[in-house]
């Protein structure tokens, strides 16, 4: 074998110098990869907290604030129920559709309509452990069709307490139902009718 084969090898070896550090340590640590760039659309910073009406139009409400009125009526017969904040048609033990009275102010600010109703649909529900709630259905304005929430009167507590007493087996007098109504029940304006929970259907 000619020695020249070895030569370059030797030369290479000889010329080997310590490699200069061409790659200095980066001074700052790169971001660890645990924080990926948001791949989706960035959040618009101009979006304000929704305050007015972002939710889909409600067509009923429950009224925990009226529980005290109901409680006071139940007290007369030494009954105690607590208000169940979760309105659940599947876990309830019993339910009853009836009507209460109240007043509506059209929720459309541009519409001045105000009306009273003696046929506001309400579904009273009883749950285990002496709990109850009651869903009150909205009505739509006949002028502008805007769905509006009622302001309830004392008939709410009367009817709810009456039903809970009945379910508890208490002998009670039926609360006064005003039979004379103000006109025929407008199913097209009643959210209770639309949900199949109106006793006027
Ligand atoms: Zn209106
Ligand atoms: Zn109805």
Image (cartoon, rainbow, N blue to C red):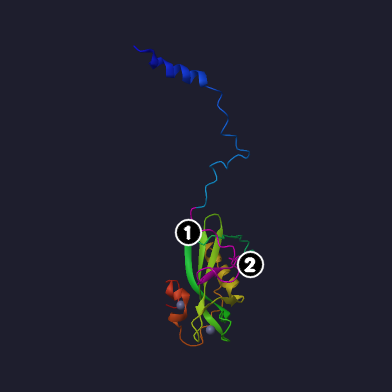
Q: Residue 150, how many percent across, how many down?
A: 57, 77
Q: Looking at the image, which residue is at 62% across and 68% down?
A: 66
User: The residue tagged with tag 2: helix, strand or loop?
Assistant: helix
* Residue 198 in sight: no
What is the span of residues highlighted in magenta in the rendered image?
Answer: 39-63
The Cα–Cα distance between marks 2 and 1, rounded to whole angstroms, is 23 Å
Total label count? 2
Q: Nearer the viewer, residue 33 or 161?
A: 33
**Mark 2 or mark 1, which has the lower sequence index?**
2
Q: Residue 112, how many percent across, how many down?
A: 58, 86
The residue that label 2 is drawn on is: 65
Judge whether residue 143 is colored magenta.
no
Residue 93 circle label: 1
Q: Main secondary structure of the magenta part?
A: loop
Report the quarter where the N terminus lies: top left
Check the image and report above or below for 23 versus 84.
Answer: above
Q: Residue 83, how many percent across, how many down?
A: 59, 61
Check the image and report above or below for 55 versus 130.
Answer: below
Q: Looking at the image, which residue is at 60% across and 68% down?
A: 51
* Residue 186 in sight: yes
Judge whether residue 61 is colored magenta.
yes
In the image, which is nearer the foreground, mark 2 or mark 1? 2
Q: Nearer the viewer, residue 164 or 113?
A: 113
Is disc 1's CB within 8 Å of ligand 2? no
Q: Nearer the viewer, residue 90 or 9?
A: 9
Q: Report which quarter residue 148 is drawn in.
A: bottom right
Q: Residue 10, how many percent across, how many down?
A: 46, 16
User: The residue tagged with tag 1: helix, strand or loop?
Assistant: loop
């Amino acid at each position: 074998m000619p020695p020249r084969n070895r030569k370059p090898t030797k030369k290479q070896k000889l010329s080997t110098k310590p490699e200069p550090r061409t790659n200095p340590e980066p001074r700052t640590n790169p971001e660890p990869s645990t924080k990926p760039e948001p791949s989706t659309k960035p959040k618009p910073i101009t979006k304000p907290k929704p305050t007015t009406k972002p939710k889909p139009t409600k067509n009923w409400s429950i009224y925990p604030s009226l529980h005290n009125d109901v409680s006071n009526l139940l007290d007369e017969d030494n009954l105690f129920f607590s208000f169940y904040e979760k309105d659940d048609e599947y876990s309830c033990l019993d339910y009853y559709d009836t009507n209460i009275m109240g007043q509506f102010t059209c929720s459309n600010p541009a519409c001045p309509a105000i009306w009273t109703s003696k046929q506001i649909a309400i579904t009273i529900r009883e749950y285990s452990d002496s709990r109850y709630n009651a869903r009150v259905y909205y009505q739509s304005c006949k002028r502008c069709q805007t769905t509006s929430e009622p302001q309830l009167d004392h008939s709410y507590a009367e009817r709810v307490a009456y039903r809970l007493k009945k379910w508890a087996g208490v002998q009670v007098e039926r609360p006064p139902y005003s039979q004379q109504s103000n006109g025929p029940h407008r199913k097209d304006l009643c959210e209770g009718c639309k949900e199949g929970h109106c006793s006027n259907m």
